[in-house]
């Protein structure tokens, strides 16, 4: 089955064509007609006052000034009452698991915000459960009343030789997945050194994708825009969301890539890049808006792609241009321009009714010709996949941890030690490689104000191994610890704390509950989010997960952390493909050199 016909309950354009023609010609009545509004044409970047649409079999049949000839006795007629008709919003790059939700619950959370299409990369679950986990995500995605396309994860591990995952993805896995009905392309190619150096597996994965006529997702996190960047682009990556500055956006689009600008829960990379359009005047059709990572709390309290579009407008982007970046630009990039992303004949009838193009209130959402949300309330069911037993119980610590497991031994006889420190940067994915002179007590290196301990606890193979280091920027105080089994991308357990016994308590707690996030202070658990599916997701409603996430944020604040969405910073401390310094199950990683490095610096 082709990608465009992937939903068994939704007809392809070819299957619908005879009736679409008949409805447009007035020979048969439409299922739905929307009149009395202003149609936003993202194809021409204009507002067509009074234009109407007729819908048949979930697709637009007629789009024009008068759809009265399409109305029959059984036709549903919606009076837009002067509101704008906007294409349903598309998220060009995102990870459902980052919301701590399953695809069904994620869809339920974002539909009321006007998102009708998502391009998702489930590489989080791929690292834990392998190809089987990707298939689980793919299958639940296809069950939803909106369009959820899956990109086959490319890098598990993200950096071979620098981390150990629960499962590994092979070129053969990628080739197999390209035949699945919901696979739209290859997920972000994070192993950019591998591509640049001609790694056979990376090139084989991209070749399998391109041979299938699908899109290769990019992820180039290096600041080097010279020969290395050119080599990466030559490998086939068609987009990139890792830009943080205008120069990054320029480099992408000038080399034929699409620049994906993200606003997630903690990534604020739109404002610094959109000036390429708003000030330099570059063609906006090669720019795409996306979220990358959004927590459940952001989805419930702030929105999804509607939030990103509003933010782009606040950054000086014209509303119609911002809407293009979240609709037709995205569809075109993935080869789906004639399937979705605009209000035009034959396309999926995904449309938002809104009274203002700048503030973008989402007043009614229609997906595939059916009202799916109204006034912020979901009006359809989002079916759940039956998650098998092997998707749960994935936390294998091997032993009960104690404070001793988190001790860092100093060089013999030392009263202090100079160590490398991971420096967290607020609202950005990259970290800083810092150093600090730390005190030594009874042969053990201690943290100090502003510098606390970080540990990676192996959780896939029950080895009992713990890798220790130091991190700064969270502002934690007192006797506390925070642990999470969401630890991009290998998803071992990350524990950050100021007290070793408390770190052990937090880690053991997640072993007991089967994964999640927990925050402890002074011997008391302040917050717990249970994530039983792969240690990454809950199958509970988004509002319930968001409430627990809000409690987690409050608990982090109670421990002294004031960073915006610092949990996202916490969960990325093991992401060994984004500079400058990270931690893995194999040790401390210098991501500027892509090599392991010593924690303790040796005096020269």
Image (tube, rainbow, N blue to C red):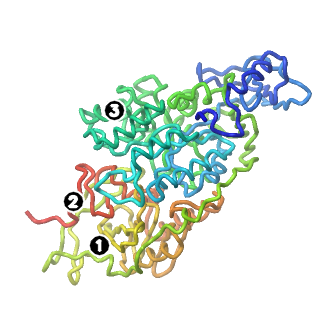
Q: CA distance from mark 3 to mark 2?
A: 29 Å
The residue drawn where x is 22% and y is 84% is: 442
* Residue 280 appears in view: yes
Upstream in the sequence, badge 1 or badge 2?
A: 1
Please state if 392 lies on the left or on the right of 267 as rendered.
right
Callout 3 environment at 10 Å: few (<14), some (14 to 19), or many (20+)? many
State if disc 1 and disc 3 touch (CB < 8 Å). no
Residue at 46% across, 55% down = 130
Whole-percent x, y for residue 208 in the image: 42, 36
> 478 or 501, which lies in front?
501
| Residue carrying label 2 | 597
Q: Residue at x 59, y 49 (%)?
A: 302
User: Horizontal and vertical percent for residue 581?
Assistant: 29, 56
* Neighbours of disc 1 within 10 Å: few (<14), some (14-19), many (20+): many
Up-down relation of residue 177 to residue 334 (above or below): below
Figure quadrant of residue 59: top right
For this view, does 71 lie left or right of residue 116? Answer: right
SS state under label 1: loop
Q: Nearer the viewer, mark 1 or mark 2?
A: 2
C-alpha span from label 1 to label 2:
20 Å
Q: Is residue 570 visible?
A: no
From the viewer's perspective, is residue 56 above or below residue 99? above
Q: Which residue is mark 3?
A: 233
Q: What residue sits right under mark 1 in the picture?
A: 447
Q: Residue lying at the far bottom in this picture: please name it.
A: 442
């Amino acid at each position: 089955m082709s990608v465009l016909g992937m939903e068994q309950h939704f007809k392809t354009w070819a299957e619908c064509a005879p009736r679409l023609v008949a409805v447009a010609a007035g020979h048969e009545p439409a299922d739905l007609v929307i009149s009395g509004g202003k149609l936003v044409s993202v194809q021409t970047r204009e507002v067509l006052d009074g234009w109407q649409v007729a819908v048949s079999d979930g697709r637009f049949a007629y789009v024009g000034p008068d759809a009265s000839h399409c109305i029959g006795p059984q036709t549903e007629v919606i009076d837009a009452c002067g509101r704008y008709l906007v294409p349903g919003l598309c998220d060009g790059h995102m990870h459902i698991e980052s919301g701590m939700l399953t695809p069904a619950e994620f869809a339920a959370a974002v539909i009321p915000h006007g998102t009708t299409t998502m391009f998702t990369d489930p590489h989080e679950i791929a690292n834990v459960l392998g190809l089987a986990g990707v298939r689980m995500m793919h299958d639940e995605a296809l069950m939803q009343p909106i369009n959820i396309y899956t990109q086959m994860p490319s890098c598990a591990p993200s950096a071979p030789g620098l981390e150990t995952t629960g499962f590994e993805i092979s070129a053969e896995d990628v080739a197999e997945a390209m035949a699945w009905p919901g696979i739209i392309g290859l997920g972000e190619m994070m192993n950019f050194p591998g591509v640049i150096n001609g790694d056979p597996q990376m090139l084989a994965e991209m070749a399998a994708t391109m041979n299938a006529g699908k899109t290769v997702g990019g992820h180039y996190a290096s600041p080097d825009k010279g020969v290395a960047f050119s080599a990466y682009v030559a490998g086939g990556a068609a987009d990139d969301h890792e830009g943080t500055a205008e120069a990054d956006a320029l480099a992408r689009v000038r080399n034929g890539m699409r620049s994906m600008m993200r606003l997630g829960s903690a990534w604020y990379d739109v404002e610094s890049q959109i000036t390429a359009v708003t000030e330099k005047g570059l063609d906006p059709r090669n720019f795409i808006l996306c979220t990358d990572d959004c927590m459940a709390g952001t989805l419930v309290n702030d929105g999804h792609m509607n939030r990103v579009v509003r933010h782009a407008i606040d950054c000086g982007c014209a509303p119609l241009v911002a809407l293009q970046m979240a609709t037709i630009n995205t569809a075109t990039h993935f080869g789906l321009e004639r399937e979705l992303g605009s209000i035009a004949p034959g396309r999926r009838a995904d449309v938002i009714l809104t009274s203002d193009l700048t503030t973008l209130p989402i007043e009614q959402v229609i997906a595939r010709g059916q009202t799916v949300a109204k006034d912020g309330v979901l009006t359809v069911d989002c079916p759940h996949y039956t998650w098998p037993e092997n998707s749960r119980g994935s936390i294998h610590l091997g032993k009960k941890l104690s404070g001793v497991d988190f001790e860092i031994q100093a060089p013999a006889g030392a009263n202090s030690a100079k160590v490398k420190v991971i420096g967290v940067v607020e609202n950005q994915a990259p970290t800083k490689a810092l150093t600090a002179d730390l005190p030594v007590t009874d042969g053990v290196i201690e943290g100090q104000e502003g510098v606390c301990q970080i540990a990676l606890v192996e959780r896939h193979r029950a080895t009992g191994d713990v890798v220790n280091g130091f991190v700064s920027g969270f502002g934690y105080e007192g006797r506390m610890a925070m642990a999470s089994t969401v630890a991009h991308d290998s998803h071992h357990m990350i524990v950050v704390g100021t007290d070793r016994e408390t770190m052990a308590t937090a880690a053991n707690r997640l072993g007991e509950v089967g994964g999640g996030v927990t925050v402890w202070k002074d011997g008391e658990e302040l917050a717990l989010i249970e994530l039983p599916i792969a240690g990454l997701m809950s199958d509970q409603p988004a509002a319930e997960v968001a409430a627990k996430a809000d409690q987690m944020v409050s608990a982090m604040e109670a421990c002294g952390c004031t960073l915006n969405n610092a949990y996202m910073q916490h969960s990325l401390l093991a992401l060994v493909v984004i500079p400058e310094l990270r931690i893995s199950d194999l040790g401390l990683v210098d991501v500027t050199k892509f090599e392991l490095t010593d924690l303790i610096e040796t005096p020269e």
